Image (spheres, grey):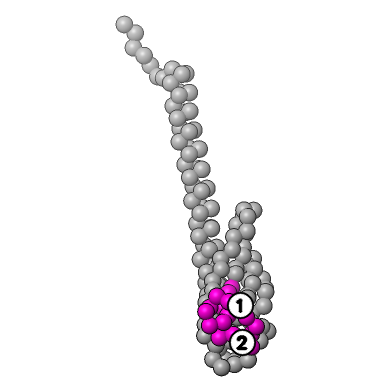
Amino acid sequence: MQIKKGQSLVEVVVALSILAIVFAATVTLIVQVVNLELSARNRTEAVAIAQRYLSRNIKALSCNCVLDSSLLVQDEEVDDGYDITSTAIYLADDIITEVESSAAKFVKVSIAVTWSDKGLPNETYELSQIMRLKR
């Protein structure tokens, strides 16, 4: 009876194949986690930007009895590649019907923040608030 020394070539190839599959799966998982973290960070930043700009617009409109769209933060691009769009829609008593600013009882102020993640399609986060006008 002969005692076997070492591993056969087939055993070594099978072991290396298993290690390669495990390594490839691990690298893929790490890449997905990093992309997910980047996306979450960008969304969090977009929410903070939207809240900051919405607050600014609400403050500008509430301090002025005469509604003027120039009070709103105009479309602009923030340093980190976020585009900001601001809108104000004047509403009647029912908060559904859009009217001229002179007949409005409410205003819906919206901020839309748009950004792109690593060549993926643009993402947009929109934040709105309806406020009663003081006249």
**Which residue is at a point 66% across and 71% down the rendered structure image?**
77
Res 37 visible: yes
- On the image, the x and y values in percent for residue 117 come to 60, 57
Helix, strand or loop at label 2? It is helix
Helix, strand or loop at label 1? It is loop
Vertical placement of residue 126 versus 17, above or below: below
**Of 5 and 129, which appears nearest the observer?**
129
Q: Residue under circle 2?
A: 103
Q: Amino acid at mark 1?
A: Glu
Residue segment shown in magenta: 91-111
Res 58 visible: no
Instruction: Say few, some or many: other residues with alpha carbon within 10 Å of mark 1 (under 14 / 14 to 19 / 20 or more).
Output: some
Query: Residue furthest toward the top?
Result: 1
Marker disc for residue 39? none
Vertical placement of residue 60 versus 115, above or below: below
Report if residue 102 lies within the magenta region: yes
Q: Amino acid at mark 2?
A: Ala
Q: CA distance from mark 2 to mark 1?
A: 10 Å
Q: Residue under circle 1?
A: 98
- On the image, the x and y values in percent for residue 32 come to 51, 48
**Could you say which quadrant of the image residue 67 lies in?**
bottom right
> Mark 2 vs mark 1: which is more N-terminal?
1
**Of 106 and 117, which appears nearest the observer?**
106
- On the image, the x and y values in percent for residue 75 come to 67, 74
Quadrant including the C terminus: bottom right
Vertical placement of residue 129 versus 24, above or below: below
**Of 132 and 45, which appears nearest the observer?**
132
